[in-house]
Image (cartoon, grey):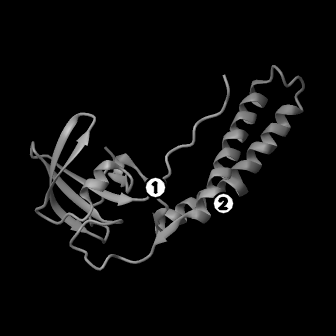
Amino acid sequence: MSRWRPPGEISSTLITVTGLDRLQRELDELWRVRRPEVVSAITAAAAEGDRSENAEYIYRKKQLAEIDRRVRYLSKRIPSLRPATELPTDRSAIYFGAWFSVEDDDGSEHDYRIVGADETDAGLGWISIDAPFARAALKRRVDDEFEVQTPQGLRRCLVTRVCYEQPLVAPTRK
């Protein structure tokens, strides 16, 4: 069995300014802090002798490979990203960066934000611009209804709120 994997789907290059900053800080921390810590731990574990049965050495080598993989990904991805620096002219409709609320058929209300593929967080309700739900919500306004096909079936939603400033009450992790 080979290690080759088919390339993933091409995701949007849009990202929020704070999302881009977070990725740059992650890359900096991985390269300047985490990687040197792991390299020195590998050196210390290698000095203990037989590397083939040294669990610490094996674990740290895997950890270093994961860090290097993430550094490689971020180093290639960050230059290709386009930060969305301006708000849309029509702020009453849902576009990239919008916080919005929807009400389902059963009356439950959910809060979402449309962000770039690299900054999604299901617990906060941050969904990728590439997600089918986000695509269905784009250009909708308050009191607009839309439908989206989900793994659970067809979902009907009513938009109840749209804003571009961070809400006063941040959603909690679900």
User: Residue 89, image x and y in percent?
Assistant: 29, 80
Q: Quadrant of residue 162?
A: bottom left
On the question of residue 171 being in view, the answer is no
Name the one closer to the observer, 139 or 73: 139
Mark 2–mark 1 distance (CA, rounded to whole Å): 17 Å
Q: Quadrant of residue 51?
A: top right
Q: Is residue 37 left or right of residue 76?
A: right
Q: Nearer the viewer, mark 2 or mark 1?
A: 1
Q: Amino acid at mark 1?
A: Glu
Q: Which mark is residue 119?
A: 1
Q: Residue at x 75, y 24 (%)?
A: 55
Pick the quarter of the image with the C terminus. top left
User: Residue 17, image x and y in percent?
Assistant: 47, 69
Q: Residue at x 66, y 58 (%)?
A: 75
Q: Residue furthest bottom?
A: 89
Q: Residues within 10 Å of mark 2 (few under 14, many from 20)?
A: some
Q: Residues within 10 Å of mark 1 (few under 14, many from 20)?
A: some
Question: Across the whole image, how many numbered discs are drawn on residues?
Answer: 2
Pick the quarter of the image with the N terminus. top right
Whether label 2 touches label 1, CB < 8 Å = no
Q: Amino acid at mark 2?
A: Asp
Q: Residue at x 25, y 77 (%)?
A: 90
Q: Is residue 155 left or right of residue 76?
A: left
Look at the numbered disc 2 and give the secondary structure of its residue.
helix
Q: Is residue 53 left or right of residue 123?
A: right
Q: Which residue is mark 2?
A: 28
Name the one closer to the observer, 25 or 79: 79
User: Residue 126, image x and y in percent?
Assistant: 36, 54
User: Residue 140, image x and y in percent?
Assistant: 20, 63
Q: Residue at x 14, y 65 (%)?
A: 142
Look at the numbered disc 1 and give the secondary structure of its residue.
helix
